[in-house]
Amino acid sequence: MILFITGKSGSGKTESSKILAKFGFDIIEMGSIIKEEMEKQNIPQTPKNTKEFMLKLRELHGNEIVAKKTLEKIKNTQNKNIAIIGIRSVAEQSFFKQNLNDSYSISLIVPIEERFKRVSVRGRVDDPKTLDEFMKYREENQIKVGIEEAIENSQYKIENTGSLEDLEKNIFLLLKELN
């Protein structure tokens, strides 16, 4: 089974990946592919640089470029249970649906205020420090690449406004439904 997880910054994708790993899934993070490409080109990871690099990469190579690079990693995985974290567009969802069987798209839904609160305490080098920066470099960026359509297009939606235990329970129930 292959799961595609989408959600805006701070929606719980990383926590979901930890939970899915506990359930035996291999995890592939699409955001790490962007960061790897930035490292290859010695581009510092700041909110502004990450936004510009991601948009430029898609502009030069098409909206499916990160999905194509992700598919290469999937082919090197032996596990039949894989979670792809960080789908950003319907183009990526469609690409995976065309190239992978037994796959499901899941979106995590969280209000913006809660997402910013979560992002402001996690301490990643490229995380925005202010709500204004969050809006400018995360929200606008994600909207530009089509995340709202990807969220809407997902087969399953999980409201992630509760505890980590609630998230784990919701993921468990969804996996049970899919099996």
Image (spheres, grey):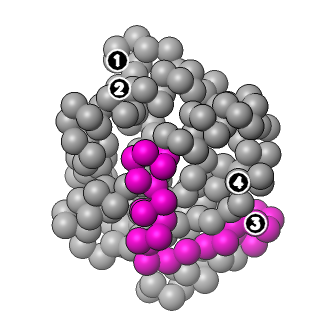
- Mark 3, Cα crowd under 10 Å, few <14 / some 14-19 / many 20+, is some
Nearer-the-camera pick, 65 or 3: 65
Quickly name the residue at label 3: 161
Residue type at tag 4: Ile
Question: Mark 1: which secondary structure?
Answer: helix
Left or right, 73 with respect to 125, comes to left
Q: Please state, as top left, top right, bottom left or bottom right, where the C terminus lies in the image.
A: bottom left
Residue stretch in magenta: 142-168
Label whose residue precedes the other's in the sequence (4 or 2): 2
Label whose residue precedes the other's in the sequence (3 or 2): 2
Residue 41 screen position, x and y as percent: 34, 14
The answer to which quarter of the image holds residue 120 is: top right
Label whose residue precedes the other's in the sequence (4 or 1): 1
Residue at screen point 34% across, 17% down: 40
- Say if mark 3 contacts mark 1, CB within 8 Å: no
Residue 125's disc is none
- Give the CA distance from mark 4 to mark 1: 32 Å
Residue type at tag 3: Thr
